[in-house]
Image: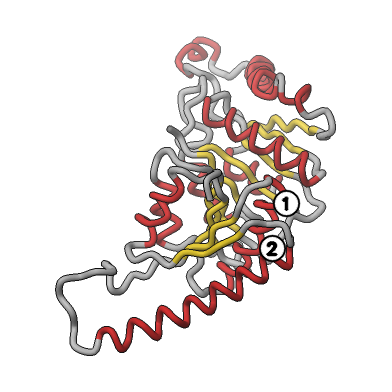
Amino acid sequence: MSEKAVVVGFDLAESSRRAVRWAAREAAGRGRPLLLVHALTWPFEEHTTIRVPGEGDVAEPLQQALRRELAQLVEECRRIDADLPVRSELPFGDPAEVLAAMAADADLLVLGGPRLEPSAGIGATSAELLARRGGAPVVVVRGGADQPGSGPVVVGVDGSATSRAAIGFAFDFASRNRCELVTAHAWSDLPLDPFQWVSHWELAWAEVHEEAAEVLAESVAGWVEQYPDVVVRRVVTPEKPTEALLREAEGASLLVVGSHGRGRFRRSFLGSVSHAVVNRAPCPVAVLRAA
């Protein structure tokens, strides 16, 4: 596949099967090919110089079984969209390393997440991939759905370059899936320098709210004109960022955040917040990672 693909990791779990179906629909919507990947963690190298007695007898049946699983998923993806270019790979190596290398040249990386328990955390591979900087956006398919519903797309905004990328991602997804877009900015960390308010012994909340609303307006400027079909609802709230995003994400089709963002305020809105929402959100979460 010469053009950038949507890459989806598969580890035999039901959550990763949902992620494959979600990725197939997203790849079709983006007009991109789909690549299914299962990394074989044993043996770590395909051509190792040291062989364990009987190793070949075990490895080959395992590979054949995995190829059958992947072939069935490929056919399932083609039933979702008959015109979707889709193939699978079965590389040897650590899953995080394999997927990170593929994400460097991918259009999107999709991973499975917990289904029933909203508080259930993501796995070690997903956590390691999200902690890395750069590479394609990562979607963790949390919840039980394998396709976008009628709920809105929610995006966190803090004025940073990373959150601007998240806004563009959210507008594109909302437009293609005909969803309302909720742009949310939480300003509990304002003002920029709290010591400037010491003489007043209280915060000028009207000014704080006005500055927060200005950040939100500046961040979405231009995108509304580029996507006139998207209905936008703006949320400015004094809540903590994580709680605000999780509240808006109830019933959402997708939650979009930036990772390691740094806005104009003292504390990052979307630094540790991205880690929190991928572990607690009730819906799929897209993370735009910092370069």
Where in the figure is residue 108, as x and y percent of width and height? 55, 47
Residue 18 placed where, x, y %?
63, 66
> What residue sits right under mark 1 in the picture?
253
Picture coordinates of residue 285, whole percent (x, y):
60, 50
3D distance between C-alphas at marks 1 and 2: 10 Å
Residue at 23% across, 89% down: 54
Of 250 and 200, nearer the camera is 250
SS class, disc 2: loop
For the residue labelled by badge 1, is the local secondary structure a helix, a strand or a loop?
Answer: loop
First along the sequence among labels 1 and 2: 2
- In depth, the one of 245 and 162 nearer the eye is 162
Indicate the amino acid at tag 2. Answer: Asp
Q: What residue sits 77% from the left and 25% below the top? A: 224
Residue 138 versus residue 86 in the image, above or below: above
Q: In the figure, is residue 78 to the left or right of 133?
A: right
Q: Residues within 10 Å of mark 2 (few under 14, many from 20)?
A: some
The residue sitting at 48% across, 31% down in the picture is: 261
* Residue 53 seen in render: yes
Task: Tell me the quadrant of the picture where the C terminus can be found.
Answer: top left
Residue 151 is left or right of residue 287, and the answer is: right
